[in-house]
Image (cartoon, helix red, strand yellow):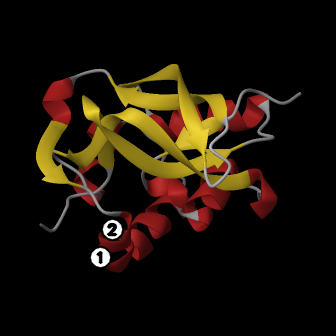
Amino acid sequence: MTVHPFFFYGTLMDPHIVRAVLRRNVDPRRLRRAVLPGFRRVYHRAASYPVLVADAAAEVTGTLATGLTLRDARLLSLYEGHDYRLAILPVRTLPANARVCAGVFLPLEDAVASTTAWSYEAWCRVHRERFLRQVRRGQHAPIATRRAWNRPTL
Protein backbone atom coordinates (compact mmCIF):
# COMPACT_ATOMS: atom_id res chain seq x y z
CA MET A 1 0.00 0.00 0.00
CA THR A 2 1.40 3.39 -0.94
CA VAL A 3 0.77 6.60 0.97
CA HIS A 4 0.70 10.26 -0.04
CA PRO A 5 3.96 11.80 -1.30
CA PHE A 6 6.35 13.42 1.16
CA PHE A 7 8.27 16.66 0.73
CA PHE A 8 11.82 16.52 2.11
CA TYR A 9 13.47 19.88 2.78
CA GLY A 10 16.52 18.97 4.87
CA THR A 11 18.67 15.94 5.57
CA LEU A 12 16.23 13.67 3.74
CA MET A 13 17.08 15.43 0.47
CA ASP A 14 20.22 13.28 0.62
CA PRO A 15 19.54 9.86 -1.00
CA HIS A 16 21.97 8.14 1.40
CA ILE A 17 20.04 9.43 4.40
CA VAL A 18 16.74 8.32 2.82
CA ARG A 19 18.18 4.85 2.24
CA ALA A 20 19.43 4.62 5.83
CA VAL A 21 16.13 5.85 7.32
CA LEU A 22 13.86 3.68 5.15
CA ARG A 23 16.26 0.71 5.31
CA ARG A 24 15.86 0.17 1.58
CA ASN A 25 16.76 1.70 -1.74
CA VAL A 26 14.31 4.17 -3.21
CA ASP A 27 13.94 4.28 -6.98
CA PRO A 28 15.53 7.60 -8.04
CA ARG A 29 12.61 8.12 -10.43
CA ARG A 30 10.42 8.44 -7.30
CA LEU A 31 12.48 11.42 -6.07
CA ARG A 32 12.13 14.73 -7.88
CA ARG A 33 12.68 18.39 -7.19
CA ALA A 34 9.79 20.40 -5.83
CA VAL A 35 9.06 23.75 -4.18
CA LEU A 36 7.05 24.44 -1.02
CA PRO A 37 5.69 28.01 -1.03
CA GLY A 38 5.03 30.02 2.12
CA PHE A 39 8.02 28.85 4.18
CA ARG A 40 11.71 29.49 4.66
CA ARG A 41 14.32 26.99 5.84
CA VAL A 42 16.57 27.82 8.81
CA TYR A 43 18.83 25.89 11.16
CA HIS A 44 17.29 24.26 14.21
CA ARG A 45 18.69 26.22 17.19
CA ALA A 46 20.47 23.17 18.62
CA ALA A 47 21.23 21.04 15.56
CA SER A 48 22.77 20.87 12.10
CA TYR A 49 19.48 20.12 10.37
CA PRO A 50 16.79 22.62 9.36
CA VAL A 51 13.26 23.49 10.36
CA LEU A 52 10.66 25.38 8.40
CA VAL A 53 9.28 28.76 9.44
CA ALA A 54 6.13 30.22 7.90
CA ASP A 55 6.95 33.12 5.58
CA ALA A 56 4.41 34.11 2.92
CA ALA A 57 7.11 35.76 0.79
CA ALA A 58 9.46 32.75 0.69
CA GLU A 59 9.65 29.27 -0.74
CA VAL A 60 11.78 26.20 -0.09
CA THR A 61 13.21 23.91 -2.75
CA GLY A 62 13.39 20.26 -1.77
CA THR A 63 12.62 16.71 -2.86
CA LEU A 64 9.22 15.18 -3.50
CA ALA A 65 9.20 11.44 -2.71
CA THR A 66 6.42 9.35 -4.23
CA GLY A 67 5.58 5.65 -4.06
CA LEU A 68 6.34 5.34 -0.35
CA THR A 69 4.66 2.70 1.79
CA LEU A 70 2.93 2.85 5.15
CA ARG A 71 6.07 1.28 6.65
CA ASP A 72 8.14 4.08 5.08
CA ALA A 73 5.80 6.69 6.58
CA ARG A 74 6.21 5.13 10.03
CA LEU A 75 10.01 5.09 9.69
CA LEU A 76 9.98 8.74 8.59
CA SER A 77 7.85 9.67 11.62
CA LEU A 78 10.25 7.81 13.90
CA TYR A 79 13.21 9.57 12.30
CA GLU A 80 11.61 13.01 12.72
CA GLY A 81 10.64 12.40 16.34
CA HIS A 82 7.96 13.75 18.67
CA ASP A 83 8.86 17.41 18.19
CA TYR A 84 7.38 17.45 14.68
CA ARG A 85 3.89 17.19 13.25
CA LEU A 86 2.96 15.93 9.82
CA ALA A 87 1.07 18.47 7.70
CA ILE A 88 -0.33 17.91 4.22
CA LEU A 89 0.63 20.94 2.11
CA PRO A 90 0.64 21.82 -1.60
CA VAL A 91 4.00 21.72 -3.36
CA ARG A 92 4.95 22.40 -6.99
CA THR A 93 7.02 19.90 -8.92
CA LEU A 94 9.99 21.10 -10.93
CA PRO A 95 10.28 21.68 -13.80
CA ALA A 96 6.67 20.68 -14.64
CA ASN A 97 5.14 23.08 -12.09
CA ALA A 98 2.38 20.58 -11.27
CA ARG A 99 0.66 21.01 -7.91
CA VAL A 100 0.78 18.00 -5.55
CA CYS A 101 -0.27 17.64 -1.91
CA ALA A 102 2.54 16.17 0.16
CA GLY A 103 3.34 15.32 3.75
CA VAL A 104 5.71 17.83 5.35
CA PHE A 105 7.18 17.54 8.85
CA LEU A 106 6.85 20.87 10.65
CA PRO A 107 8.25 21.69 14.10
CA LEU A 108 5.71 21.86 16.90
CA GLU A 109 7.36 25.03 18.21
CA ASP A 110 8.73 28.01 16.30
CA ALA A 111 11.10 28.56 19.24
CA VAL A 112 13.40 25.80 17.92
CA ALA A 113 14.17 27.86 14.79
CA SER A 114 17.28 29.99 14.51
CA THR A 115 17.50 33.01 12.23
CA THR A 116 20.30 31.48 10.12
CA ALA A 117 19.34 30.20 6.68
CA TRP A 118 20.15 26.50 6.16
CA SER A 119 21.99 25.31 3.06
CA TYR A 120 21.89 21.70 1.86
CA GLU A 121 25.25 22.12 0.13
CA ALA A 122 26.92 23.49 3.28
CA TRP A 123 25.33 20.73 5.39
CA CYS A 124 26.70 18.09 3.00
CA ARG A 125 30.21 19.57 3.21
CA VAL A 126 30.31 19.92 6.99
CA HIS A 127 27.86 17.47 8.60
CA ARG A 128 26.66 14.81 6.17
CA GLU A 129 29.17 12.01 6.82
CA ARG A 130 28.91 12.18 10.62
CA PHE A 131 25.12 12.50 10.43
CA LEU A 132 24.89 9.50 8.09
CA ARG A 133 27.03 7.36 10.42
CA GLN A 134 24.66 8.17 13.29
CA VAL A 135 21.55 7.36 11.25
CA ARG A 136 23.07 4.06 10.12
CA ARG A 137 23.64 3.19 13.77
CA GLY A 138 19.89 3.41 14.21
CA GLN A 139 19.70 6.64 16.14
CA HIS A 140 16.13 7.48 15.21
CA ALA A 141 15.31 8.91 18.62
CA PRO A 142 13.34 12.12 19.13
CA ILE A 143 15.18 15.39 18.56
CA ALA A 144 15.87 15.99 22.25
CA THR A 145 18.12 12.94 22.39
CA ARG A 146 19.75 13.63 19.01
CA ARG A 147 20.88 17.18 19.74
CA ALA A 148 24.29 16.13 21.01
CA TRP A 149 25.33 14.55 17.69
CA ASN A 150 23.76 17.14 15.41
CA ARG A 151 25.23 20.40 16.67
CA PRO A 152 25.83 22.88 13.85
CA THR A 153 29.16 24.46 13.14
CA LEU A 154 28.18 27.98 12.08
| Residue 115 placement (x, y as % from top left) | 10, 45
> In the displayed structure, does residue 39 sit left or right of residue 87?
left
Q: Quadrant of residue 124?
A: bottom left
Q: Out of 112 and 35, give the one closest to the viewer.
A: 35
Residue 27 visible in this rendered orientation of the protein:
no
Q: Which secondary structure lies at badge 2? A: helix
| Residue 97 placement (x, y as % from top left) | 62, 43
Q: Callout 2 environment at 10 Å: few (<14), some (14 to 19), or many (20+)?
A: some
**Residue at position x 77%, y 56% in the image:** 24
Question: Is the residue 55 above or below the residue 153 in the image?
Answer: above
Which residue is tagged 2? 123
Residue 46 visible in this rendered orientation of the protein:
yes
Numbered tag placed on residue 13 in the rendering? none
Question: Is the residue 6 above or below the residue 42 in the image?
Answer: above
Question: Looking at this rendering, what residue extends furthest in the right direction?
Answer: 1
Q: Quadrant of residue 66?
A: top right
Q: Which secondary structure lies at badge 1? A: helix
Q: Callout 1 environment at 10 Å: few (<14), some (14 to 19), or many (20+)?
A: some
